[in-house]
Image: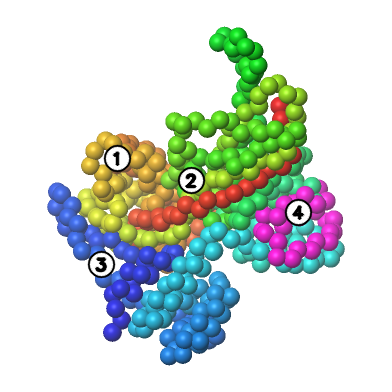
Amino acid sequence: MRRTVNWVIAATLMTGVLGFGIRAEDKPVAEKVPPATPPPVVASKIDPVVSQLIADLGSEDYRVREKAGRELAVLGERALPGMKSALLATDSPEVQRRLAVLVRKMEIDRLISPKRITLTVKQKTVKETLDEISKQSGYKIEYGGANGAEQRHDFEFENAPFWVAIDKVAAASGCVVFAESDDETIRVYNQDSINPYVAYSGPFRFLATNIHSNKSVQLSGISRRGGGNNRYENMSLQFQIQSEPKNPMLGVTQAEIISAIDENGLSLVPPKDPNNRQSYYENRGMRGHNTYGNLNLNRTGGAAVSRIKSLKAKIGIILLSGVTAEIAIADPLKTKAKTFVGRTTELDFGSLVEDPNTKGAYVLEVTMKKLGTTDENQQDYNWSNSAWSKLELQDAAGNKYQTYGPNSINNNGSSVQITLPFNVSDRRTGKQLKLGPPTKLIVNEWLSVTHEVTFEFKDLPLP
C-alpha cells in the first residue's frame, strides 16, 4: 500500500503540486479541519529510459543504484516529470529517498541555472534566429524589428546563457531587448538607443540605468591639525533586474557592495552603517520578471576620476519555487457567503456574478485573511496588497480567466476586502479568449526560495 508520506514529501519538494484546502462549515466562525486526502495519482507516460533508471534506484546492487542516480541527474529536466510522478507513486523507501534528493536538487538547479543556447546559423534573418532560440529555450520571443528585418547574419553559440545570446542577436540587428512588460514574453524591438552596461549572472540580466550624485563640503568641525578630508560625494547606482521566463521573482533583498574601484584603483565603497542591517525587501509579494535595486557609493577627496573600473555586488533574489492550490471552491457561481480555510489563508467568499456591463466577464467579492496574525505587529502589507494575484478563476477545461487587478481593495495588512474583475480578453493583444462558464475558484499559495546572486558591472562612467 502506498504510504501517505509520499504525498507529504512530494508536496514539499515539487513545483506545481496541488494540495486542496478544506471548506469550513457554514458557521459564523470558520473552523480549521484536518488536511484533505491527497488527490489520486494520475498515471502519466514516462520515458522508458527514465522509467528503467527509476526502477534501478531500488536495485539490491548499490553500484546499480548509484549509476542510476548519476544518469538521472545527467538527463536533468528531461527526466524530471517522470521522477515527480514516480515520487508520488512508489512503494519503495529506497527509491523514494533517492528520488526526493534528486528532485530537490534538480528543482534548485532549474531555478538558479540559465537556459543554454547552442546553435550555428548562416545567413539567417534575425527573426529566423530568434525562432530557433525560442525553440531551444521554450520561451516566447516577439520580434518587432522593422529596419533591416530582411538582413541576414551569421551567429554561433556554444552553450551560451540565454540572455547573452539574445543580447548578441539584438545588437547585431540594431534592436534592444525589452523585459519591462513583466510577463513571460521576451520582446526584441528596433530602438534608436542602446543599453551598453549589462551584467549577467545565471538566469538574470542586470541593466545599469543611472547614477545620481550628491556633493558636499564640510565647513565646520575641521581639525586644527589639518589633513583629513572635508569633501564628500555620495552616489547611488540604480539598476534593473530581469529574469528568464522560467524564474518569476517575488522580490529582492537590499543589494550589498563586495568591491568597487575607480580607474585609479581607489575604493568607492562607503563606510558601513552599523544601523543599516541590509535586510529590507523591494517589491516583495508581487510576482514578475522585472524589478529594481540600488547601491550606494562614496567618492572622497575631490579626485578627478571619471569611471568605475569594476563594481562587484550581491543581492538576494526571492524566487517563486512552486505553487500549491490551498483552497479550491467548486461551482463559485452558486456559492454565497461561505468561509473556506486553507493552510495560510482564510477566505470569506461573498459572491461571484456576471459583470452586467461585459458579457462573459465576472466580478468576485471576497475577504482574505492571513492566518497566524494576532496583532498589529504582524501586519504584512506586501501580503495584503498582492493577495488578489493569488486568486485564479477557471472554466471546466482548466482555462484561466484574465485579471489585472482589483476594482477596489481595502486592507489592514492582515486582511483584505477585494472586488476583483475577471475578463475574457487579453489586455495586451485585445484578443478574446474562448472560455466556458467559471467552474472553480482557486486560492494559491506561493512557495519561495531566496537565492543570493553575485554580479559585476565594468567601466561605468561617473558624473
Amino acid found under the numbered disc labelled 2: Gly
Task: Nearest to the eye among marks 2 and 3: give it.
Answer: 2
Work out whether residue 326 can be spotted: yes
> Mark 1 vs mark 4: which is more N-terminal?
4
Tell me the kind of residue under disc 1. Gln
- Describe residue 171's horizontal placement relative to residue 13 as left or right: right
- The residue beneath circle 4 is 168
Q: Quadrant of residue 326?
A: bottom left
Residue indicated by mark 2: 251
**Residue appearing at x 85%, y 56% in the figure:** 151
* Residue at image point 43% right, 64% down: 16
Observer able to see residue 461 = no
Q: CA distance from mark 1 to mark 3?
A: 28 Å
The one of 323 and 202 positioned closer to us in this rendering: 202
Query: In the image, 126: left or right of 100?
Result: right
Dot in front, 1 or 4:
1
For the residue pair 98 and 300, the one nearer the viewer reads as: 300
* Residue under label 3: 36
User: Considering the numbered disc 1 on the image, is that residue within a helix, a strand or a loop?
Assistant: helix
Alpha carbon distance from label 2 to label 3? 31 Å
Foreground tag (4 vs 3): 4
Name the residue carrying label 1: 378
Which contiguous range is marked in magenta? Answer: 145-172
Callout 2 secondary element: strand
Where disc 3 sits, the SS reads loop
The residue lying toward the viewer, choosing from 389 and 324, is 324
Q: Are marks 1 and 3 in contact (CB under 8 Å)?
A: no
Task: Give the Cα distance between marks 4 and 3.
Answer: 51 Å
Numbered circles on residues, count: 4
Q: Is residue 364 left or right of residue 207?
A: left
